[in-house]
Structure formats: structure tokens, C-alpha cells
Amino acid sequence: MNTIRSVALSLLLPAVTGFAADPPEGFRALFNGEDLSGWYGDNPHTSRKTDDRAASIRSQQSDFLAHWKAENGELVNDGHGPYATTKREYSDVELMIEYKTVALADSGIYLRGSPQVQIWDTTEAGGKWHIDAQKGSGGLYNNPKENADTNGKNPLVYADKPFGEWNALRMRHVGNRIWVWLNAQLVVDGATFHPFFDKTKPMPAKGPIHLQTHGGEIRWRNIFIREIGTEEANGYLRGDEFGTGFEPIFNGRDLNGWIGDKKGKAVSDGILRWTDGGHIYTDMQFSDFVFRFEFTMTPGANNGLAIRSTGSGNPAYDAMCELQILDDGAERYEGLDPRQAHGSAYGMAGAHRGFLRPSGEWNYQEVTVDGSTIRVKLNGVEILDTDLADIEDYMGDREHPGKMLPKGHLGFAGHGDEHTFQFRRLSVKELD
């Protein structure tokens, strides 16, 4: 059975009651059932358009108090006013919430400040069938219209209850991927949650939760959250690799199958610990492939991932490229060229920054190489999508003669002995 689906079967919501229930194990309440503590008002579609967002948010608070209230253990909105917004910001989370709304109203839940897990009036009288409201709630409304039935925009199944009954949503958001259950039915299965306010960048690394107000009364209760740790997040992102074509390229015991400078590389307990020495490469060569691995590094560390290398020379130039493995938030890299940031094709194409986990935590990275294109996903977020064949502007005007190599070794490129890296769970799937 699919790991994500099987986990869902055991994640049942607390019993429906008239008042706030105790949080399930590992969760905490976002709403205390008594007042608006921990919440403020913000319609981000308004505040983001102003020059002074903080001032705009301050101006919305009287309206927030006029249209939101706590009543009988429920967080109630009359269909007007700014959105209820958590004072805390969140990254990878599991969120549980129950809601009850009325005819002609629709709403949604914003994660990391971004819209939205959709809540519909699904009836024909609601007037939204032209935008697929009849297919049910729980989908990702702002995902692209193309392939809407498969990309998470529309739910996999219709799971809404009739007006007057409570609906239960459960959302798991890791990186830019999201799973949604509505009334214990899986309606979004690991889809990419596309950004809305700035479509040129990935979903923010963290942000508040907004409960949207839109056109009619909505009541919320039993609002519980659990922050997802590194190991659990990596497990969801990797998924169950059995039968998917991924093969390990590191046995976790020694460096058999690897060539190059093995000085300063120790292997034990499934981990390659790198403290010194130069480049190492797989004995095998690869053309088009997907590579998955996990890594940690000490503050300020610098390494690289060699793609289609000849096994000699400088992989930043003589291989197809060197993908940076770099603590790019360290003070020493304050003046970094964008094409040197973590995940960048060194000197050629810059990656989005801000998605590395703190030093010492395990990061999960997936690299897809297909022809001259390279995509990099870090901790579930796509930080690079580039076609090297289109690049003619190079950092320092230094060309990269190896960038169109059709095949080569996969490896790590060492840069001195100042810092320590750890690598584990290295696996490759070759593409046809």
C-alpha cells in the first residue's frame, strides 16, 4: 500500500463535538475556543498592494474585531472583514480544522500566507460550476487550470457534506507539496502547491495561516496544528522507492563503486562523512537521470555536485556543471553572485535561496537531468529549472566547455578541509 495513503487511514479527526476538543497527540490548538488570542486580521490581497504593509494590517484590526468572534467553542465570521491570521508563521505542518458554512458562500485556507485550499458552495445555485465548484472542496484553487483534474486544482473525489453539517479538513504541507483529506477522503495526493502572489518564485519557506472570509457565514472549530520535523518531512518527500526504478549508488559501508580522492572520507552507519580531500565520482556514468540524496553541513561549508563529469579537471567547467552545495546564508558569502547560491549551476544559472535547513539538519535534494535541462528540488521546493543550452552569459565571462556533455560520472566536488559534510541515501533512477 502507498505509504502516504496508509498513513492517512490512521489519522482520524477527533470526535465531532459542540466545543473545542483536546488536540490529538503531537498537535496543539491554534484556537482556544474562547477568544481571538493568537489571531489578527489581514486580507493579504489588500495589504500586499500597499507601500506600508504593516500600516495596512494595523488599519484592518477594528474591522477584524467587528466581523469575527468566538462563540460556543467556534471561531465565527459573518462573511465580511479581513481574514483571520495566525500571529505565528509556519513551515512544514500538518493542520486539522473543522468548518461549517452556508449557501452562496465559499472560503479557503491559506498556508504560508498563500492561497488556498478551497472551500466551495458546491450546489448549482452557488453559481460557481463554471469554475468546477461542483467537483467539491479541498482542491488547490490557484493551481494552473491546465490539467486541473490531476494537478491538485480539483479534488480527486467529491467529499463535501451538506450545508448544516461539519466538514473536517486535514492538510499536510511539506516543501511545496501538499496532501489534503476532506472528511477522511484523500482529495489531493502530494500535489505541488503553486505560489500565487509572486509566481516567479517558489512558495515561501514559511508564513502565516489565513482563514478566508468570502460571502457568507463560516464557522471553524477544532483547529489543531503539528509542526513536521526534518526526518518525517524527508520521508514524505522521498516516499516509498520500492519498484520506482531508483537504485542505490552508495552501499553505506564503504566507497566501493566510487573513484577519485578518497582521503578524508569515512563511511559508517550508512553515512559518508567528508572532512578533507578532493573530488570523488561514481564508477558508473549516467546520461539522463534523477538523483536523490540527503546531506548536512557545518556553518559556511562549501561542496558541489558534479553532473556528467569526465572524472578529471574542474567539474565546475569541465563537467556538464557543478551544482552548488553551499551554506549560502553564512556571513562569509554575503556578496555571493546569484549563480553561486546553493543548488545553482555554478556560474551559469542561479537557484532560489532561503530553503536550506539550519546547519546540522538533514536536507533532502532531488536533481533531474534530462538532455540539457536541470531541475533541482530542495526540501520539496523547486529551486532551479534551467536549460543550459540557452545560457550564454557566464559569471566572470568564463565559459563552461563541458556543459553539453551527453554522459558522465556523478560525483561530489570537495573544496578544502575547513568544514564537514555528511551524505546518505544516495540513489539514482536512469531515464529512458
Image (cartoon, rainbow, N blue to C red):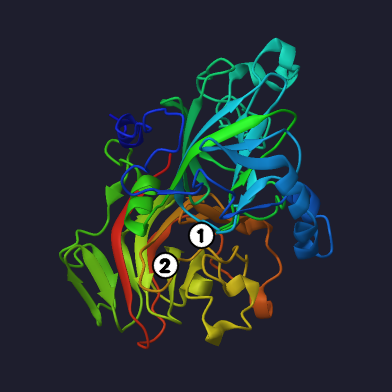
> What numbered label is drawn on residue 21?
none
Query: What is the spatial separation of the Cα atoms under label 1 and label 2, in whole angstroms?
Result: 9 Å
- Quarter of the picture holding the N terminus: top left
Q: Amino acid at mark 1?
A: Leu
Q: Is residue 76 above or below residue 263?
A: above
- Residue at mark 2: 310
Marked residue nearer the N-terminal end (1 or 2): 2
Residue 351 in sight from this viewpoint: yes
Callouts 1 and 2 close, C-beta under 8 Å: yes
> What numbered label is drawn on residue 405?
1
- Along the line of sight, the residue nearer the viewer: 171 or 424: 171
Find residue 386 and report its horizontal and vertical position in percent: 61, 55
Helix, strand, or loop for circle 2?
Answer: loop
What residue sits 46% from the left and 53% below the top? 92
Q: Amino acid at mark 2?
A: Thr
Find residue 125 and report its horizontal and vertical position in percent: 73, 12
